[in-house]
Image (tube, helix red, strand yellow):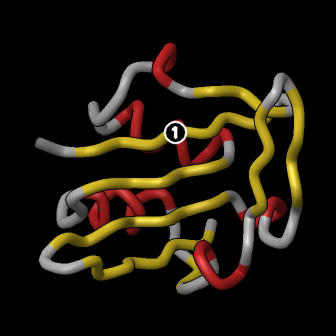
Amino acid sequence: MYARMHRMGGDMILAACDDELLGESLEGGGRRIEVTEEFYSGAAVSEEQLAEWMRSAGSMNLIGNRAVGVAVREGYASPDQAFEICGVKYLMVVMM
């Protein structure tokens, strides 16, 4: 997986995607998402590293069945909160 932290004001936004999705465009069900290198590409991370980064994020933008699976496993979301585009899960999480 690839992950990148973005600073927006005082908040940290975690962007993460499964490896094979980087550079792809997904469209279906009235939704379209571009998995751009500018937003998602950063460090290659393991599931354990991604879970660690999630602890310091104020919000998350995750695409890919593995990336979303880490957020679900870590308790940040339930499986039914993710959208699915072309069989790929997409999840946005805002911590309050």
Q: Is residue 60 above or below residue 7?
A: above
Residue occupying image coordinates x 13% and y 77%: 10
Total marks in image: 1
Q: How far from the left and from the top, in percent, is residue 86?
A: 87, 32
Q: How far from the left and from the top, in percent, is residue 82?
A: 54, 27
Q: Is residue 36 above or below residue 88?
A: below
Instruction: State the quadrant of the N terminus.
Output: bottom right
Secondary structure category for the residue under label 1? strand
Residue occupying image coordinates x 35% and y 42%: 93
Residue occupying image coordinates x 56% and y 85%: 42
Give the quadrant of residue 24: bottom right
**Residue 26 left/right relative to 57:** right
**Residue 5 left/right relative to 52:** right
**Residue 9 left/right relative to 71:** left
Residue occupying image coordinates x 73% and y 73%: 36
Q: Is residue 94 above or below residue 25?
A: above
Query: Three-letter amino acid code at disc 1?
Result: Leu
Q: In this rendered view, identify the residue nearer to me: 29 or 13.
A: 29
Q: Is disc 1 surrounded by few (<14), some (14 to 19) or many (20+) residues within 10 Å? A: many
**Residue 14 left/right relative to 10:** right
Instruction: State the quadrant of the C terminus.
Output: top left
Q: How far from the left and from the top, in percent, is residue 67?
A: 56, 49
Q: In this rendered view, identify the residue nearer to me: 37 or 72.
A: 37
The residue at which mark 1 appears reads as 91
